[in-house]
Amino acid sequence: MRFYAQCDVPLDFISIFRALTQAEVRYVLVGGLAVILHGVDRVTADIDLTLDLAPDQAKAAIETLLESGLKPQLPIAAVDFADPAKRASWHQRRNMQVFSFWDPTQARPTVDLFIENPIPFEELWQQSVVIKYDDLPIRIASIGHLIRLKEIAGRPRDTADIAALRELLTPP
């Protein structure tokens, strides 16, 4: 799966999912890429993930992203993401919604990890959809959950996604 940046350089999304899957990290893809994988024609430049925020799972996710060469966007120790108290502090004091990683080589997109899951992770996980790409399972949020997440975000750009996702739920 290749997507292109503004300068026609392919972005490698799959290596990120492969690394997380090999590390047995429990994630659910949300955001624009999940909308695209459900069949909506739109553009995105990042990967938005909700994680099982249990400390061991959060730590595994962070270690996996760091080992794959991604760097935290903010000058914060990435391992602190695994600490629920630090995530809560970031959310309350900085109004931080996501912890972002970027690729210094620009070969892969930014990865945004939700600091808090707007919908309980177990609910997202149980109702998620698994698609296969070259035998690699990619777990994406259900259409209903994507609509809820877009409504919670409440940004103007989410309105079009909500309408397109609702169309997918409407029988022809």
Image (cartoon, rainbow, N blue to C red):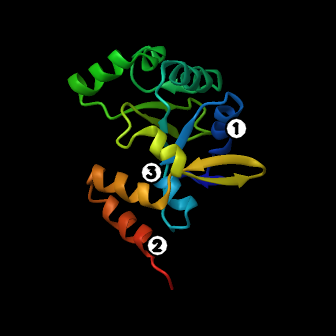
Residue 32 on image: x %, y %:
46, 54
Tell me which amino acid carries mark 2.
Answer: Leu
Task: From the image, state whether disc 1 or disc 2 is nearer to you.
Answer: 2
Q: Left or right of 97: which side holds 6?
A: right
Q: Which mark is residue 18?
A: 1
Q: Nearer the viewer, residue 76 or 134?
A: 134
Determine the CA span between mark 3 and mark 1.
19 Å
Q: Left or right of 20: which side holds 87?
A: left
Please give the residue where the numbered disc 2 appears in the rendered image. Answer: 169
Image quadrant in which you'd find residue 61: top right
Above or below, 116 against 159 in this view is above
Q: Are marks 1 and 2 in contact (CB under 8 Å)?
A: no
- Give the mark nearest the N terminus, 1 or 2: 1
Q: Nearer the viewer, residue 74 or 95?
A: 95
Residue at 55% across, 38% down: 27
Residue 28 on image: x %, y %:
53, 43
Q: Which mark is residue 126?
A: none
Tell me which amino acid carries mark 3.
Answer: Gly
Residue at 34% across, 16% down: 86
Would residue 46 be visible to someone looking at this image? no
- Give the mark nearest the N terminus, 2 or 3: 3
Residue 104 on image: x %, y %:
56, 29
Tell me which amino acid carries mark 1.
Answer: Arg
Q: Residue furthest bottom?
A: 172
Residue 1 on image: x %, y %:
68, 53
Above or below, 110 against 166 in this view is above
Residue at 50% across, 31% down: 52
Element under label 3?
loop
Q: Nearer the viewer, residue 123 or 41?
A: 123
Element under label 2?
helix
At label 3, counting other C-alpha atoms closer than 10 Å, the crowd grade (few under 14, some 14-19, many 20 or more) is many
Element under label 1?
helix
